Image: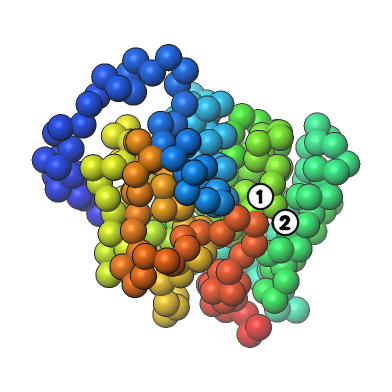
Amino acid sequence: MERIVFLCLVSTSLSAVPVQKFLFTPKWVPIGYKGRQIHGDLTAMDEIITANEVHATRFVDGTTSLREGDIAVTSGRRSKVCFARSCLWSKSVDGHVYIPYRVSSDYTETQVQLIKKAMENIEEDTCVRFVPRTHQQDFIDIQRKTGCWSYLGARGGRQTVSLQSPDCVQLGVISHEFMHALGFVHEQSRPDRDKYVTIMWPNIWRDRLRNFEKFRTEDLDLPYDYSSIMHFGMYSYSMEGEPTIIPKNSKNTKLGQTSYLSNLDKLKINRLYKCGW
Ligand SMILES: [Zn+2]
């Protein structure tokens, strides 16, 4: 996966950002969170940002860090670049893509039901099926760790999806993390995103500029999806409540989703996994 370099562009425009403002904030919370509340519904990604910035650090543990806010990346031998079709879950001869899972016993029964509802959210109109793990070698291990995060695509073996309780145990958040586990990155990191949205660099929390990088991914011949559950919200990582992403088509376009996958999200799954749905 190639990172598209843009830092030289933003460094000039951000020279006037008041650094001390967030260095000396008494309670270290995402500045701009208040602004997003005023501006309407929080997207799934906003909920994730809130959980991860307040409770988790940038580093999940010694070797794992979070890219784009919630995609776990491990340094070292096991790290694997997930590019396009290189990290797909295998497809069964019956046409389904089975994802074996295990859920930690730390969750309440109600939370387990919500996790299962998010699985149904993904399964509906797609070829993906989540199945309780029996003997399968590759599976997702849903754990109540700190923060909401997932690895990208199938890594091989056991892979954690972290859903901190209660912050991350929400339908939209869980579905978003499962989409990462299926191999999808954030919608606004598409290489062609500048045709559809304007990134408001000066409004972005300076420490989190890297979360707005582009990645060379396949667009699967599908249109840009403003309402993808994988899209950042209009105020994600806002420094002072000003928008960080503005849609180019209309000011009234809503970015992201709160709870459900968009129709295009479902199409994306079926295209990536070559399912005839
Ligand atoms: Zn994400």
Give the alpha-carbon distance from disc 2 to disc 1, as whole Å: 6 Å
Q: Quadrant of the N terminus?
A: bottom left
Q: Nearer the viewer, residue 89 or 166?
A: 166
Residue 215 lies, in percent from the top left, at: 34, 57
Taking the image as shown, residue 79 lies to the left or right of residue 150, namely left
The residue sitting at 78% across, 50% down in the picture is 114
Q: Which of the two labelled residues, at mark 2 and mark 1, occupies the earlier sequence position?
A: 2
Taking the image as shown, residue 11 lies to the left or right of residue 109, namely left
Q: Relative to 45, does residue 30 appear above or below in the rendering?
A: above
Q: Is residue 76 visible?
A: no
Kind of residue at badge 1: Ile
Residue 206 lies, in percent from the top left, at: 29, 34
Residue 32 sits in which quadrant?
top left
Describe the element under mark 2 as helix, strand or loop: helix
Describe the element under mark 1 as helix, strand or loop: helix
Identify the residue under disc 2: 118
Residue 148 lies, in percent from the top left, at: 59, 39
The residue sitting at 27% across, 50% down in the picture is 200
Taking the image as shown, residue 85 lies to the left or right of residue 2, namely right
Residue 95 lies, in percent from the top left, at: 70, 78
Q: Quadrant of the C terminus?
A: bottom right
Check contact, mark 2 vs mark 1: CB within 8 A. Answer: yes
- Beta carbon at label 2 within 8 Å of ligand 1: no
Identify the residue under disc 1: 174
Taking the image as shown, residue 144 lies to the left or right of residue 73, namely right
User: Dot 1, crowdedness within 10 Å: few (<14), some or many (≥20)?
Assistant: many
The residue sitting at 85% across, 37% down in the picture is 108
Q: Nearer the viewer, residue 132 or 5?
A: 5
Q: Relative to 15, does residue 244 appear above or below in the rendering?
A: below
Q: Which of the labelled discs sits on residue 276, or is there none?
A: none
- The residue furthest bottom is 276
